[in-house]
Image (tube, coloured by chain):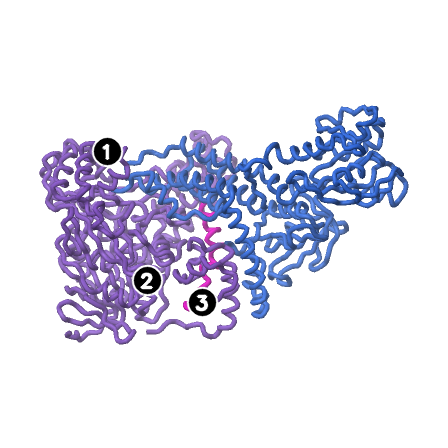
């Protein structure tokens, strides 16, 4: 093994959506960073659908942006259709989604990585961690080069022992067209990690020239398209539509005729797949009464004829795939350019991680993305960003950055993963966030900009913009609370026009804005300042006013949970010696090893009474052991 | 698990005792004390001073019990927060009523061990004490666990489970429509939502109505026997007890002390209280006994108003009739073996009546049946289907689920946003979860994925 001369601060293994964010964060925070990937032509490649965002995922992307990550800016620069979902629902559950030009997305990210100081991009397959005793020193690669690093972040995606299935044919691969990563997961297993197997799938890529789009319903993006990033002014890419098509009973017949050769139903696949992203054969089997299933035909880019039929992933053999796709109206002559397939891969149960994403077993080793059992580019990127930040903070001798469940979806996701572990691919949903009304896309900057700036990821200039916005929101809120109706002619006319005869003189503008029928648009009819208030300030003030009761209720809950969340549980706590816990609770705590009382309270089966007992046990223990509390961690 | 709100609990052991203490800790303690406690002298608490007075109901100021109250202002208290203790007469009914009143004023029922936990958290207890208290709390936890397991096996948890499933399903519908706008799952079916939630509400209402019945089954009822001297109260008591505990005499006014005996009426535990005969009197000792009898009326679950049917309705009878107005009462027309003379005034109205002879025993079975049906509404005891909630904790949880569901339904009617409606449903589920166990996000997602074809 040739040992490379440089000792990096951070080594990132894998250059997918997690790896790119991790490497950029570490390098931008001043750490010398090595990014290793099996294939340098597949950096930030969208292996599945060519889209970013959606419910809860759009939230993640905005949080990544607020913290100083790259994903939002990358999609803004390469997106070819932007839409806001749930516009008829409240602001907390509105979410952004965009189609990407897949090749431009990957190339732009690669360019950003290449232009980043402190960041070194190299091709290589990591076959194992290099440890001296129990100390992590670096990684070994297939080509015989050993890279030394102070910290290592594994973002292996679907590559570890990847196995591709098309019907009963299967072969090793990390993704169609790429080699798998072999050896690393075996070593992780030997080191004591719980390595499990998951499965995911992707539909065929179809030749757009062989689709009759005139028979499909087009779906256009919003005009003007709204960007993801708080720092993008506008979208300049040409915008194109998607198209909606449907399966029919004949399609389902074809699917059923191939089930005997489905690797899933024949028992060849052992990995667990995502329930929220089932293959078409899953849908046909589980919902036999449904006469049609919808698909969005998504363009893969501006310069290619390849299209992606969403929701139509399958692992059936190719002789079923061809007639199946051709059974869809408008696709009668369709040519498959790349077949659909399922892929099985190794992951490591995230229950073995700390909230910083550092593994509990090996110091200075971090895991992010699909290795933690998640699915989705956005989930991966969010974890990658946090792992990159925390590895860099470790190098600098600073405390890790951990986001709370009341602060960010990223916080909810990581807390779910490390507290509960996962047995199926984990995807973010807004329903996972108990403080959903606080975690909105629109206020991601209010929630996280400052933290991004504190760790050194958000540049001063951007932070200055944010501070000005925050001041303006506060000032405007103050203004509408103190500004009162004087009942001049203009105001009286306005009230009469909107049927607000019951409003008295001296009523505040804030009170008026609480009315469901009144928005800033209406206020602007008689109030000149409202008219000149910038839209992003209006939006914040309006949401604060209209959602106020609910926001206050949630803030109240956050406040009440604060002490539990802030009470750490010692690492070596012996739950079997704590009096008053039931055996079931003891076993759960010993297995999950929560970091805080708050985490412990979220483990199913751990009762409020058990939490009381624990907190008392802690007080007793804390007194005895005071003075042993660790100071800021050192390298 | 909350830490900074105000908590309350019964701090003395359950069951009959000379005294029962309701303890309140938190920032609302003093305000609750001022609202519920009527001082005999003065109108404010002196810290660490025992005041004499009465506890009243928060809604109508009706006296719940004569009591002593003490306020210990922070930090000189067990929890280092403001602590209020209301010392009432023993007996679960009184103490639970006082607790209910405290909860109605904004306190929350304490979790097991929560007072001690606050004492620790606030640095009140040192290490040695800490370990001692831990054992106590461990014991409490095991006890509550045993209770929970008994109830888990029973029909109550099945009923609650049905409610939980209905609410989980409703929430899953709401969540699916929020999280999967791009999937082909159709618009939110508000009609189905409304009917699902309404059904759950009906179930909760039924369980809440059964609360008192449940408590009665668990703790029995207290029955106060009142009547003018010589109406036959003690004979009736003895007949019911089938033994001669109370002194029976034909000299008016000999039963001055309240006699209490428990009898098993077909599965229903009945505590029978005999009292001094009631009549206008100048005898100081006897008047004390009469006052005590009338004073006991509000505390009893049922009054047996004994009349001598062989004598005319007298002024003394009228005095009692006035005192039992609005109280659950059975009119007992004693001495049915003698020719009837009595002419009941119209104010007796709808009160159920039973004619019997305490002397011969004729009609006693009718009385037993009347007592049972008054409380158990028919075949409750015979039916295996019978389900009742019997704990203040359960009632508290279900009542809070009910109000959350009311908020949900009115919000649905007003067309409020789904994500705020989801909050109401989650509140309701979490309240119901305090009885059976929580509903996790995964439970909700399970329903979403099994009900809708999700996945683009």
Q: Which residue is mark 2?
A: A357
Q: Is residue B314 visible?
A: yes
Q: Colour of chain A?
A: purple
Between discs 3 and 2, the one toward the N terminus: 2
Co-location on one chain, circles 3 and 2: yes
Between discs 2 and 1, the one toward the N terminus: 1
Q: Nearer the viewer, residue A277 or A172?
A: A172
- The quarter holding residue A3 reads bottom left
Residue A520 is situated, as x and y percent measured from the top left of the image, at 39, 40
Q: CA distance from mark 3 to mark 1?
A: 55 Å
Q: Which residue is mark 1?
A: A292
User: Is residue B434 on the magenta stretch?
Assistant: no
Q: Is residue A72 visible?
A: no
Q: Colour of chain B?
A: blue
Image quarter hosting the N terminus of chain A: bottom left
**Label 2: chain letter:** A
Image height of A142 relative to A464, above or below: below
- Name the residue rendered at 27%, 33% in the picture: A289
Q: CA distance from mark 3 to mark 2?
A: 23 Å
> Which numbered disc, 3 or 2, marks the residue closer to the eye?
3
Q: Which residue is mark 3?
A: A574
**Label 3: chain letter:** A
Asked if labels 1 and 2 touch by Cβ distance under 8 angstroms, the answer is no
Find numbered disc 1 in the image and state the secondary structure of the residue it sits on. loop
**Label 1: chain letter:** A
Between discs 3 and 1, the one toward the N terminus: 1
């Amino acid at each position: 093994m040739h040992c490379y001369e440089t000792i990096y601060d951070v080594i990132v293994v894998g250059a997918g959506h997690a790896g790119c964010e991790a490497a950029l964060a570490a390098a931008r925070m001043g750490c010398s960073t090595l990014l290793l990937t099996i294939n340098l032509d597949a950096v930030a490649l969208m292996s599945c659908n060519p889209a970013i965002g959606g419910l809860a995922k759009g939230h993640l992307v905005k949080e990544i942006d607020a913290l100083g990550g790259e994903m939002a800016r990358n999609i803004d620069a390469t997106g070819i259709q932007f839409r806001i979902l749930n516009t008829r629902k409240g602001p907390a559950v509105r979410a952004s989604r965009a189609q990407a030009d897949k090749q431009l997305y990957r190339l732009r990210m690669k360019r950003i990585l290449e232009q980043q100081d402190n960041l070194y991009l190299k091709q290589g397959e990591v076959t194992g961690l290099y440890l001296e005793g129990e100390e992590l020193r670096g990684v070994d690669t297939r080509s015989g080069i050993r890279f030394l690093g102070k910290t290592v972040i594994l973002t292996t995606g679907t590559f570890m022992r990847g196995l591709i299935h098309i019907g009963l044919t299967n072969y090793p691969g990390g993704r169609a067209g790429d080699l798998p990563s072999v050896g690393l997961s075996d070593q992780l297993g030997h080191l004591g990690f719980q390595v499990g197997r998951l499965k995911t799938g992707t539909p065929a890529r179809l030749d757009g020239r062989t689709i009759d789009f005139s028979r499909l319903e087009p779906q256009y993006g919003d005009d003007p398209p709204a960007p993801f990033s708080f720092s993008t002014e506008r979208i300049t890419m040409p915008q194109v539509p998607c198209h909606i098509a449907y399966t029919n009973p004949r399609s389902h017949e074809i699917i059923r005729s191939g089930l005997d050769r489905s690797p899933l139903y024949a028992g060849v696949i052992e990995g667990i797949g995502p329930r929220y992203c089932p293959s078409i054969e899953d849908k046909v089997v589980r919902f036999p009464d449904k006469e049609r299933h919808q698909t969005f035909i998504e363009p893969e880019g501006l310069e290619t004829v390849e299209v992606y039929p969403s929701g139509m992933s399958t692992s059936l053999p190719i002789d079923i795939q061809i007639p199946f796709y051709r059974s869809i109206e408008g696709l009668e002559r369709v040519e498959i350019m790349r077949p659909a397939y399922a892929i099985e891969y190794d992951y490591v149960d995230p229950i073995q991680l700390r909230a910083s994403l550092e593994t509990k077993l090996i110091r200075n080793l971090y895991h992010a993305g699909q290795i933690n059992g998640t699915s989705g580019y956005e989930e991966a990127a969010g974890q990658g960003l946090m792992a990159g930040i925390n590895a860099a903070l470790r190098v600098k001798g600073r405390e890790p950055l951990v986001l709370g469940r009341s602060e960010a979806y990223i916080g909810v996701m990581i807390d779910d993963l490390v507290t509960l572990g996962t047995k199926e691919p984990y995807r973010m949903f807004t329903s996972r966030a108990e403080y959903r009304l606080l975690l909105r896309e629109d206020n991601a900057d209010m929630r996280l900009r400052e933290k991004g700036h504190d760790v050194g990821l958000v540049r001063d200039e951007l932070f200055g913009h944010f501070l000005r916005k925050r001041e303006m929101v506060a000032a405007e809120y103050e203004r509408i609370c103190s500004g009162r109706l004087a009942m001049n002619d203009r105001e009286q006319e306005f009230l009469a026009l909107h049927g607000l005869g019951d409003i008295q003189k001296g009523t505040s503008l804030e009170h008026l804005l609480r009315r469901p029928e009144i928005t800033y648009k209406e206020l602007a009819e008689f109030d000149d300042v409202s008219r000149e208030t910038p839209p992003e300030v209006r939006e914040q003030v309006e949401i604060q006013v209209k959602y106020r009761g609910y926001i206050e209720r949630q803030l109240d809950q956050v406040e009440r949970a604060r002490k539990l969340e802030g009470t750490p549980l010692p690492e070596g706590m012996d739950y079997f010696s704590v009096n008053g816990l039931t055996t079931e609770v003891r076993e759960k705590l010993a297995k999950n090893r929560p970091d805080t009382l708050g985490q412990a309270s979220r483990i199913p089966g751990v009762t409020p009474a058990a939490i009381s007992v624990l907190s008392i046990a802690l007080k007793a223990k804390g007194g005895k052991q005071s003075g042993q509390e660790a100071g800021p961690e050192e390298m | 698990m909350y830490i900074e709100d105000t908590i309350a609990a019964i701090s003395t052991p359950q069951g009959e005792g000379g005294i029962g203490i309701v303890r309140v800790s938190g920032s609302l303690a003093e305000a609750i004390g001022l609202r519920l406690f009527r001082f005999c002298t003065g109108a404010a608490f002196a810290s660490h001073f025992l005041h004499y007075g009465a506890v009243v109901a928060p809604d109508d100021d009706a006296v719940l019990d004569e009591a002593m109250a003490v306020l210990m202002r922070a930090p000189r208290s067990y929890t280092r927060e403001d602590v209020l203790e209301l010392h009432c007469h023993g007996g679960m009914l009184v103490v639970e009523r006082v607790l209910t009143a405290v909860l109605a004023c904004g306190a929350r029922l304490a979790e097991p061990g929560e007072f001690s936990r606050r004492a620790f958290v606030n640095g009140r207890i040192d290490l040695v004490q800490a370990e001692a208290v831990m054992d106590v709390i461990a014991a409490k936890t095991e006890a509550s666990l045993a209770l929970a397991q008994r109830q888990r096996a029973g029909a109550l948890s099945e009923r609650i489970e049905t409610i939980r499933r209905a609410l989980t399903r409703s929430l899953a519908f709401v969540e699916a429509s929020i999280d999967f706008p791009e999937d082909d799952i159709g618009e939110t079916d508000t009609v189905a939502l409304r009917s699902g939630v309404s059904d759950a509400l009906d179930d909760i209402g039924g369980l809440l109505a059964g609360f008192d019945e449940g408590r009665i089954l668990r703790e029995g009822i207290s029955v106060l026997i009142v009547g003018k001297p010589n109406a036959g109260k003690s004979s009736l008591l003895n007949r019911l007890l089938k033994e001669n505990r109370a002194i029976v005499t034909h000299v008016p006014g000999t039963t001055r002390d309240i006699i209490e005996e428990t009898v098993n009426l077909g599965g229903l535990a009945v505590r029978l209280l005999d009292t001094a005969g009631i009549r206008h009197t100048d005898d100081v000792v006897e008047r004390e006994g009469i006052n005590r009898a009338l004073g006991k009326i509000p505390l009893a679950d049922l009054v047996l108003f004994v009349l001598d049917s062989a004598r005319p309705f007298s002024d003394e009878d009228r005095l009692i009739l006035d005192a039992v107005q609005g109280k659950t009462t059975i009119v007992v027309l004693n001495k049915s073996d003698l020719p009837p003379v009595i002419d009941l005034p119209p104010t007796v109205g709808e009160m159920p009546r039973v004619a019997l002879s305490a002397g011969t025993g004729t009609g006693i079975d009718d009385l037993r049946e009347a007592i049972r049906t008054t409380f158990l509404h028919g075949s409750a005891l015979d039916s295996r289907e019978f389900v009742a909630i019997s704990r203040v904790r359960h009632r508290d949880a279900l009542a809070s689920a009910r109000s959350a569901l009311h908020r949900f339904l009115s919000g649905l009617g007003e067309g409020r946003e789904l994500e705020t409606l989801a909050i109401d449903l989650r509140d309701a589920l979490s309240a119901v979860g305090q009885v059976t166990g929580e509903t996790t996000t995964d439970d909700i997602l399970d329903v979403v994925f099994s009900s809708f074809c999700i996945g683009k």
